[in-house]
Image (spheres, rainbow, N blue to C red):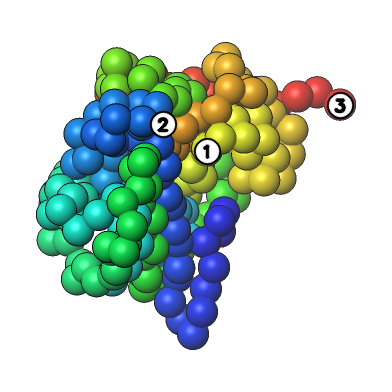
Amino acid sequence: MRNSIEVNGLVVSIDNSGCIGTKEHDIVQVANEVTAYFTARTAILEQLCAGAIPVQLLMANFSGDEVWSEYEQGFKRAFSEMGLEMPPLMGSSETNFQSLQSAVSLTMLGKKQFERNTDRCEFYVIGEPLVGNDVIENPHKIAQLNEVYEGLINGFIQAIWPTGSKGVGAEITRFTGESYTADVNLTDSAGPSCAVLAAVKKEHEETFLHSMTAPVNKLIKVKE
């Protein structure tokens, strides 16, 4: 697992977003539904990384009661992309004070559904590292949630590993256990897991490559 943990048989993952939304002082101005979608997307990818599917959502909403439904719609969109019903959602909103900037946190509880296996696999980067407005302006460069999910369910992706603010390079060794490089920027933030590492059996490479619409780059092992 990457940043998720396992507690009493449940996989717990979390993601949050700050200063992104519709408030006057937000640094990135986007619809609250979009903010929620990318927050859910990252938490879902952490679940899939652990071989789990979410069964319960918990939201901490610091942006005010009036945006709860907008955040909920963004969460639903992420699950709809995978052809899944959104799990039950509960949580709390900050209503005592009005924040100057948007903030939301989403925790997911999931149950293990499939086994991860990186033995004798080839490794790839799906998508490119993007953050801030670049995420909104370059949707075609983002690893698609539905394609990653279908790859795992259908078995031509053996395991995934999301990347984030520390960049692709920081995650490669954690995922593969060895030193690799790739023809993508290895140090820039990947934002809301716009780039995802994937383990693919050699016999499934052609199917995998034809199934991804975002840019795909193979990891190359660094010679000692």
Instruction: Give the number of the disc on residue 194.
Output: 2
First in sequence: mark 2 or mark 3?
2
Q: Nearer the viewer, mark 2 or mark 3?
A: 2
- Disc number lying in front (3 or 1): 1
Instruction: Report the residue that reaches farthest toward the bottom.
Output: 8
Quarter of the picture containing the N terminus is: bottom right
Q: Nearer the viewer, residue 74 or 125?
A: 74
Q: CA distance from mark 2 to mark 1?
A: 7 Å
Residue located at (56% from left, 49% from top): 118
Which amino acid does the dot numbered 2 rest on? Cys
Q: Amino acid at mark 1?
A: Thr
Q: CA distance from mark 2 to mark 3?
A: 30 Å
Give residue 27's position: percent from left, percent from top. Answer: 40, 27
Quadrant hosting residue 212? top left
On the rendered structure, is 64 left or right of 5?
left
Q: Which quadrant: the C terminus?
A: top right
What residue is shown with label 1? 163
Residue 2, how many percent across, how many down?
57, 54
Crowdedness near tag 2: few (<14), some (14–19) or many (≥20) residues, C-alpha within 10 Å: many
Residue 127 seen in render: no
User: Left of 52 or right of it: where is 119?
Assistant: right
SS assignment at label 2: loop
Disc 3: which residue? 224
Left/right placement of residue 218 relative to residue 83 reads: right
**Disc on the earlier residue, 2 or 1:** 1
